[in-house]
Image (cartoon, rainbow, N blue to C red):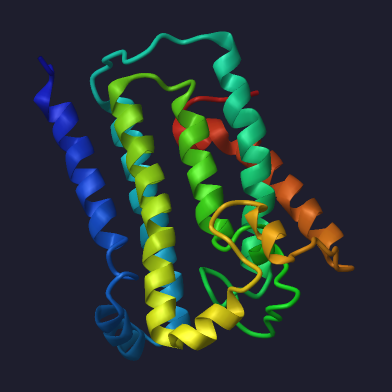
Amino acid sequence: MLSDPAGWGELATAMTVFLLTHAIPARPALRGRLVALLGRRVYLIAYSAVSILVLVWVIGAAANAPYLEVWPRADWQSLVPAVGMLLASILAVFALTMPNPLSLGPKRDFDPDRPGVAGFVRHPLLWAMLIWSISHMFPNGDLSHVVMFGLFALLSAGGMVMFDRQYRKTLGDAVWQQLSKKTSNIPLASFAKGWRPRLAPTDGLRFGAGLLLYGTLVVSHGLITGVPLL
C-alpha cells in the first residue's frame, strides 16, 4: 500500500503539468497561436523556461515521494549514467548546433547527402533525452524515480514517432523521403543507406562544448537534484 498520499499527489500533479506543457509542440494549431501572439523568439524563451521549471519540479517531487524499492542499489549502477550522460551531452550539443529539418534543432542549410548528426540518428536530441532517462533508472531503483524516468523515456521514444508523422505530413511524403534518405531512428543504422560519418572543421568545437556541458552537469548535479556527485 502506498503511504503518504500527499507525497504521491505532488508527484502526480507535477507529472501531469509536465505532460500538458509538452503537449503544446504536438498541437501545431495551439503552438501557432502562441507564436503569433508572443512572437517566435519570446515563445521559445518562455516555453524553454517553463519546461525547465516544470522539469525541476518533477525531479524534486520524485525525490520527496515516499521511498518504495523496486530493485536494490549496487555500486556498478552509477557507472551507467556516468557513461551515458557523456554520450547524451555530446549528442545534445550536435543536435542543437547542426541543421536537421526532420527533428528538433536548426532547420536551414541541411544537405540530405551529408546529413551530419542526423545521419548518426534522425532525432539526436530525443535520443539524448532517452539515454538520460534510461541510464538514470539504473541507480534509482525506487518507485517514484522508476516512474519518472520511465515516463521521460516513453515521451522521448514516442516523440520520435510523433515527429516523423508530423514532418512527413508537413513536408509531404516525397520531400520527407528525400531529406531522410540517409537517416534512421536507430543509431548508426543509416550505414545501410549509404551514410558515412564526415567530420566538419567545427565538430571539434562541438565535442568540446559537449564535454563542457557534461562537466557542468556533473558539478551542478547536487544543486539540481540534491544528490552531489563530487
The front one of 205 and 56 is 205
The front one of 32 and 121 is 121
The front one of 113 and 10 is 113
Q: Residue at x 37, y 13 (%)?
A: 71
| Vertical comparison of 110 with 62: above or below | below
Q: Position of residue 167 (x, y in %)?
A: 43, 78
Figure quadrant of residue 220: top right
Q: Position of residue 151 (x, y in %)?
A: 32, 42
The quadrant of the image that shows the C terminus is top right
Q: Left or right: where does residue 143 sit relative to residue 106?
A: left
Figure quadrant of residue 19: bottom left
Q: Left or right: where does residue 26 sit relative to residue 217?
A: left
Q: Residue furthest front?
A: 192
| Vertical comparison of 127 with 43: above or below | above
Q: Residue at x 79, y 62 (%)?
A: 196
Q: Left or right: where does residue 79 sit relative to residue 60?
A: right
Q: Residue at x 68, y 65 (%)?
A: 193
Q: Position of residue 11 (x, y in %)?
A: 23, 36
Q: Residue furthest bottom?
A: 36
